[in-house]
């Protein structure tokens, strides 16, 4: 059923009547106003910040059609399905349509019956699509480019097909252009403006702070064991586990399934049918966990993903930020866990071998920033936001959430929104700890003088020609083949470091690099002592570093990893009483049954946040339902009687 939308309504009225929200998230209103004013706009908003509404609402006000360039078929289908569920006329043209469906869609486009048309960049460049739009009874009012970072060679998902969009825009000159992305440094922003030929654009950058996502980075000591322990703490919750290789994906998926976890795999080695089936089951909450390579995730609009685990280091902060942004899109508490090992760096650099010198330079620069994040000894959120040019204070006060203002060249309006990208109603009370470092109260300085001197001395004994793993093997007295090949079992430093465990030595190594005592250089991460390291070693100075090493162990000093996660308290969370919990469970069961009957994902009906509000507030009338976030006029009419009966316990 399509909703009869009054085109004279204001953006605020459409926001409430069609989408069921009382107020805009930070940045949305100004972006929408720029588009309605006909001004080209680049909007950088974090995943889950509400980018879609920035073009969907203007599309319902414009007389003509809004063309949305989307990189993936799954993303188009998800967006169109959600719009149709809200009563909005939307369509896509791609290979999933049969001939009759294609012809009907073309008729809808030409007659002005479709307000939004989703296309891939490849389809946008075809003469057939251009001809359809030329012959339409209504003009192209807006061209929206989703995942706009794909047009930049500095972006982590560069796609040459995006370079053809400018030619399409040149043909439909009267259409305003909106470029959207969740990850764009200043350099990527400049590339987007230049390559899309945006005309005196407004560049609007929302805060990159996703306050509801807890950032957690831990040494990968027992990868599978750490994942199993995490999943046991997050039973029946929806999550994604990212791996570097297909082999890891298959191995971890099998291990989890054998332990009784609801998990499926996703990578390019599966058939198209298998990938589509696994993704569909995840979206429809028929499976809890997807174990995947980075091929999975773009365009996944599932709002109730509660965690994202990285089994290894991502290739860049941009990639990492976009992937963790798939958690907590509904604004509820979520977690991003990165299991990091120094060995990941060499594995990633292996992928750089076939790149040109310029490409390798860019890739190396992006990787180094990711390494610095994983090894940082201070607040991870502060590090992450600083990378994107935003200042941050862990106290979350209004005066402290002030991003840096980008420079202006006189032609482009730059504006950074000071508010959080997550809606205020989901962040009224924020967790006191935003990452593993802050949760532990900050890493305390510990006297590591003796083990640090042993490590630095060993680096000199091997002429600064080996990596950290080999140095640590020497200190632990290993007799492996490499040690014996180079006669390193005869060094004076062989076996003198057994007071620390292997993982504790790696922790110390990271802390020493972070403090500038050593550096890792080259493809093989060769450890070299810096001038500061030489000075401290020669002078026998005391060395104190922030480390998570427990020196109180009786035999070996081990890593002191946090055992308990901070709790995020928000008014949008479910009230702690049996009646409310029972009502929430009944609502979820009803939603699942209805979604299965309609063959749509449960979040197309309502997301978890909406069900939580219904359970907490227990409205007794149709008008009361309209006060709930996420319930517009159409959904109140369609589902109101069912919900009120469930609340009454009928």
Image (cartoon, rainbow, N blue to C red):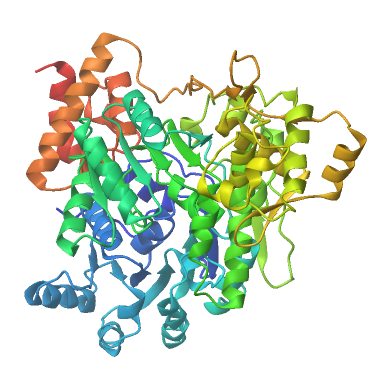
Q: Is residue 569 above or below residue 482?
A: above
Query: Which quadrant is the C terminus positioned in?
Result: top left
Q: Is residue 321 above or below residue 286?
A: below
Asked whether, in this view, residue 73 is left or right of residue 364, the answer is: left
Q: What residue is at 52 percent from the left and 77 percent from the top?
A: 196
Q: What residue is at 50 percent from the left and 63 percent from the top?
A: 350
Asked whether, in this view, residue 532 is left or right of residue 474, the answer is: right
Q: What residue is at 56 percent from the left and 38 percent from the top?
A: 478
Front-most of 285 and 449?
Answer: 449
Q: Quadrant of residue 435?
A: top right
| Residue 474 in the image, given as x and y percentages of width and height | 63, 40
Residue at the limit of the structure toward the right, as seen here: 539
| Residue 39 in the image, given as x and y percentages of width and height | 54, 69
| Residue 206 in the image, given as x and y percentages of width and height | 57, 50
Q: Quadrant of residue 615?
A: top left
Front-most of 262 and 577?
Answer: 262
Q: Is residue 163 above or below residue 405?
A: below
What is the total number of numbered labels drawn onto the structure image? 0
Q: What residue is at 28 percent from the left and 62 percent from the top?
A: 268
Query: In the rendered image, is residue 620 in sight?
Result: no
Asked whether, in this view, residue 105 is left or right of residue 490, the answer is: left
| Residue 551 in the image, given as x and y percentages of width and height | 66, 19
Query: In the rendered image, is residue 394 in sight?
Result: yes
């Amino acid at each position: 059923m399509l909703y009869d939308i009054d085109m004279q309504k204001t953006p605020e009225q459409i926001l409430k009547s069609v989408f069921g929200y009382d107020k805009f998230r930070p940045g949305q209103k100004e972006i929408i106003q720029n588009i309605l004013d006909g001004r080209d706009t680049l909007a950088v908003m974090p995943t889950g910040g509400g980018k879609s509404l920035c073009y969907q609402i203007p599309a319902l006000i414009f007389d003509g059609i809004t063309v949305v360039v989307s990189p993936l078929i799954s993303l188009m289908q998800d967006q169109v399905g959600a719009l149709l569920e809200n009563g909005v006329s939307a369509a896509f043209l791609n290979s999933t349509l049969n001939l009759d469906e294609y012809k009907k869609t073309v008729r809808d486009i030409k007659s002005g019956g479709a307000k939004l048309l989703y296309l891939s960049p490849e389809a946008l460049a075809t003469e057939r699509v251009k001809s359809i739009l030329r012959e339409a009874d209504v003009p192209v009012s807006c061209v929206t480019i989703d995942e706009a970072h794909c047009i930049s060679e500095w972006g982590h998902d560069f796609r040459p097909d995006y370079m053809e969009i400018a030619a399409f825009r040149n043909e439909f000159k009267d259409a305003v252009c909106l470029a959207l992305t969740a990850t764009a440094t200043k350099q990527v922003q400049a590339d987007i403006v230049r390559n899309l030929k945006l005309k005196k654009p407004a560049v609007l950058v929302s805060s990159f702070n996703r306050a509801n996502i807890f950032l957690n980075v831990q040494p990968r000591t027992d990868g599978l064991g750490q994942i199993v322990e995490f999943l046991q703490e997050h039973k029946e919750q929806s999550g994604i586990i990212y791996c570097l290789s297909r082999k890891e994906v298959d191995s971890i998926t099998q291990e989890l399934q054998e332990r009784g976890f609801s998990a499926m795999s996703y990578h390019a080695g599966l058939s198209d049918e298998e990938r589509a089936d696994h993704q569909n089951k995840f979206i429809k909450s028929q499976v809890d966990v997807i174990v995947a390579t980075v091929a999975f995730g773009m365009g996944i609009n599932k709002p109730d993903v509660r965690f994202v685990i990285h089994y290894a280091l991502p290739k860049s902060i941009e990639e990492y930020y976009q992937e963790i942004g798939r958690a907590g899109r509904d604004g509820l508490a979520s977690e991003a866990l990165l299991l990091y090992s120094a060995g990941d760096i060499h594995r990633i650099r292996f992928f750089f071998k076939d790149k040109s010198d310029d490409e390798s330079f860019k890739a190396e620069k992006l990787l180094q920033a990711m390494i610095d994040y994983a090894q940082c000894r201070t607040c991870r959120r502060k590090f992450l936001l600083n990378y994107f040019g935003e200042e941050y204070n862990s106290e979350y006060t209004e005066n402290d959430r002030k991003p840096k203002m980008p420079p202006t060249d006189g032609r482009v309006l730059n504006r950074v929104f000071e508010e959080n990208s997550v809606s205020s109603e989901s962040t009224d009370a924020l967790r006191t700890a935003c990452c593993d470092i802050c949760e532990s109260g900050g890493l305390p300085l510990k006297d590591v003088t003796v083990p640090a001197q042993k490590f630095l001395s060993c680096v000199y004994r091997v002429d600064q020609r080996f990596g950290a793993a080999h140095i640590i093997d020497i200190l632990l007295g290993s007799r492996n083949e490499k040690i014996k090949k180079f006669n390193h079992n005869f060094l004076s430093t062989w076996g003198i470091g057994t007071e620390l465990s292997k993982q504790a030595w790696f922790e110390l190594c990271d802390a020493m690099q972070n403090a500038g005592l050593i550096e890792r250089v080259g493809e093989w991460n060769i450890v070299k002592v810096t001038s500061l390291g030489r000075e401290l070693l020669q002078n026998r100075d005391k060395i104190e570093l922030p480390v998570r090493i427990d020196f109180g162990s009786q035999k070996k000093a081990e890593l002191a990893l946090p055992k308990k996660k901070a709790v995020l308290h928000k008014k949008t969370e479910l009230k702690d009483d049996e009646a409310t919990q029972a009502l929430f469970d009944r609502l979820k069961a009803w939603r699942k049954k209805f979604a299965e009957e309609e063959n749509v994902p449960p979040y197309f009906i309502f997301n978890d946040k909406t069900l939580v509000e219904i359970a907490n507030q227990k409205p007794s009338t149709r008008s009361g339902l309209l006060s709930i976030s996420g319930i517009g006029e159409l959904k109140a009419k369609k589902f109101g009687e069912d919900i009120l009966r469930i609340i009454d316990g009928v």
